[in-house]
Amino acid sequence: MKTKLYIFLFLLNISSFSMLGQEQKMTAAEITQFKEEVNVVSKKIKSLSTDFVQYKHLDFLSKDIETSGKMFFKEPALLSWQYKKPYNYSIVFKNGKILINDEGKKSAVDIGNSKIFARINKLIVGSVSGNMFDDKEFTISYFKLKGQNLAKFIPKDATLKKYIKQIELTFDKEEATVVQVKLLESSDDYTRIVLKNKVINAKIDDSVFTN
């Protein structure tokens, strides 16, 4: 169970569709416009539900590990990841705690007892809402892709950097919302999560965040 949580927290990430060769750096004016568009949209997001497919890449495996499920977000910081395939496993971020349900085996982690967990919680919530442009926490670079925008975040905190080398958020250019997350570890392993069938600001029952 702890292994699954570790994998989720430190391998969660959003990336581009392996189109590094097509990346073009944004100009200063384009960066300003992009950030403004994302911030306007993120401020309007009160709730969000989306299907997701997660691909875990381990260097020693020939094929990525694929899992899928449903994610729910409700402001200010309620977050639920419900894995449905190939196993039932859910993680809820709520009231300063991480609530875990591993096929009926329940446990909880107090985020307040760990600065690293607190930072990761902030990262996850920020990546879902698109509200992550904190120059004090990250060195950020911005790129254009076909129909998408890409922001790369390198943590400045040395402790966090031991676990997360880089975070990549891919945004739909028209909607200015996150469509993919990639989190690179200090090794060459990474996790990529694709978000699809998003529903914004629909009513989400509080029971979704009970684990």
Image (tube, grey):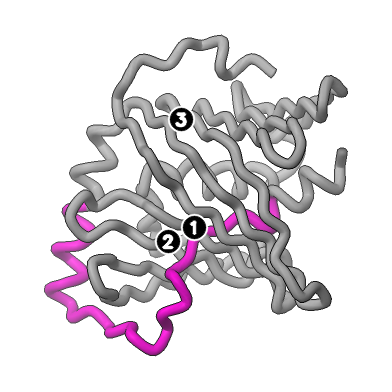
Q: From the viewer's perspective, tell me whether residue 12 is left or right of residue 18.
A: right
In the picture of the structure, the residue carrying the numbered disc 2 is 169
- Disc on the earlier residue, 3 or 2: 3
Q: Amino acid at mark 2?
A: Leu
Residue at 52 percent of width and 34 percent of height? 71
Give the Cα separation between the discs numbered 2 and 1: 5 Å
Q: Which numbered tag is attached to residue 21?
A: none
Q: Which numbered tag is attached to residue 73?
A: 3
Q: Is residue 63 visible?
A: yes
Question: Which one is in front, 91 or 64?
Answer: 64
| Numbered disc 3: secondary structure | strand
Tag 2 and tag 1, C-beta contact below 8 Å: yes
| 53 shown above or below 140 | above
Tag 3 and tag 2, C-beta contact below 8 Å: no
Q: From the viewer's perspective, tell me whether residue 71 is left or right of residue 105.
A: left
Q: Residue 65, position in %: x, y?
A: 72, 59
Q: Quadrant of the N terminus?
A: top right
Residue at 78 percent of width and 31 percent of height? 109
Q: Magenta residues, as a range?
A: 9-37
| Numbered disc 1: secondary structure | strand
Q: Residue 176, position in %: x, y?
A: 24, 52
Asked if residue 106 is among those painted magenta in the image, a careful observer would answer no
In the picture of the structure, the residue carrying the numbered disc 1 is 181
Q: From the viewer's perspective, tell me whether residue 86 is left or right of residue 195.
A: right
